[in-house]
Amino acid sequence: MTEAPPVVPGRVAVIMDGNGRWARERGKPRVEGHRVGAESVRVVTRTCARWGVEVLTLYAFSLENFRRPKKEVDFLMKLLARFLVKERREIMDNGIRFRVIGRREMLPPRVRGLIARLEEMSAANEGMKLVLALAYGGRAEIADAARAIAERAAKGEIEPGEVDESLLEDHLYDPDVREVDLLIRTAGEMRVSNFLLWQISYAEFHVSPVCWPEFREEKLKAAFLDFAGRKRKFGGLLPEEEGK
Ligand code: IPE
Ligand code: IPE
Ligand code: MG
């Protein structure tokens, strides 16, 4: 078991990319990459919980991923259903709170049922929060929040003048994900792909060249060590820069 790094970010988000490339490099079908990738989800979740991460948000399926061939989408949904059953025990044993963000009405009914069940079962847990982004898009999330606010304003529940950043955050899919400290992307791509657009405004980025199926404890630790070396300024100055 890898020892915990000295600094552990509170809110971590991961763009789990490269399952297809991992499989192709080994002459295997893409779905094999997704299968091994699901194992990385289990390892990374357990490790983050053990090291004391507060909120872990994993990008598992984007709205745009519905553009993939039906066969691949169906496989991913089946894999997800299996995960939601298989990981129940692990989630409960580790006191993890499970939540899904995204347009869940676009997911198959069986998957929706399993999600609701696990969310309910784990709601009172007090350990790490695990958030799975499914049928998720960052722009859609902001649009959905704007619509919810407009509906409340139309009912007279809020005045337009009350709309500020904090009110908008209250209408995001999960207000616990309002801020990200460390955003990890695997498989080397330097882009955000419509993930948590609002929440990553001051996140530190770590792009790993390793594909997701190979991203395990040691790679996670390397990401956290990278984070520990960053000087976060939030637009201000560091204490040692002041008065210079
Ligand atoms: C990430 O791996 C998993 C999902 C997006 C569901 P990809 O399937 O995108 O893998 P690459 O990018 O083709 O290698
Ligand atoms: C982002 O990966 C979505 C997930 C990891 C779920 P993609 O593979 O879909 O992103 P692009 O298409 O390379 O931008
Ligand atoms: Mg990809």
Image (cartoon, helix red, strand yellow):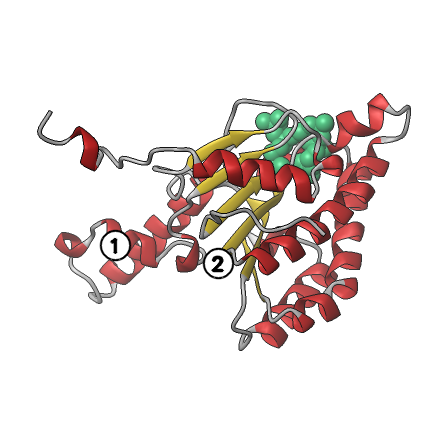
Instruction: Say left or right for 206 vs 21.
Output: left
Marks 1,2: beta carbons within 8 A: no
Q: Amino acid at mark 1?
A: Ser
Q: Quadrant of ligand 2?
A: top right
Q: Position of residue 36 (x, y in %)?
A: 81, 42
Rendered view: 117 above or below 42:
below
Q: Position of residue 195 (x, y in %)?
A: 50, 38
Quarter of the picture holding the C terminus: top left
Q: Is residue 66 visible?
A: no
Crowding near the residue tagged with mark 1, few <14, some 14–19, many ≥20 C-alpha atoms within 10 Å? few
Rendered view: 162 above or below 242:
below
Residue ID at (54%, 50%): 57
Residue identifier under label 1? 166
Residue ID at (42%, 44%): 181
Q: Nearer the viewer, mark 1 or mark 2?
A: 2
Residue identifier under label 2? 54
Q: Nearer the viewer, residue 57 or 162?
A: 57
Callout 1: helix, strand or loop?
helix
Q: Is the distance from the Cβ of mark 1 to the nearest ligand 2 atom less than 8 Å?
A: no
Instruction: Say left or right for 235 vs 206.
Output: left
Q: Earlier in the sequence, mark 1 or mark 2?
A: 2
Rendered view: 164 above or below 232:
below
Q: How many marks?
A: 2
Instruction: Say left or right for 105 vs 109.
Output: left
Residue ID at (65%, 64%): 115
> Residue 76 lies in what quarter of the image?
top right
Q: Position of residue 216 (x, y in %)?
A: 70, 42
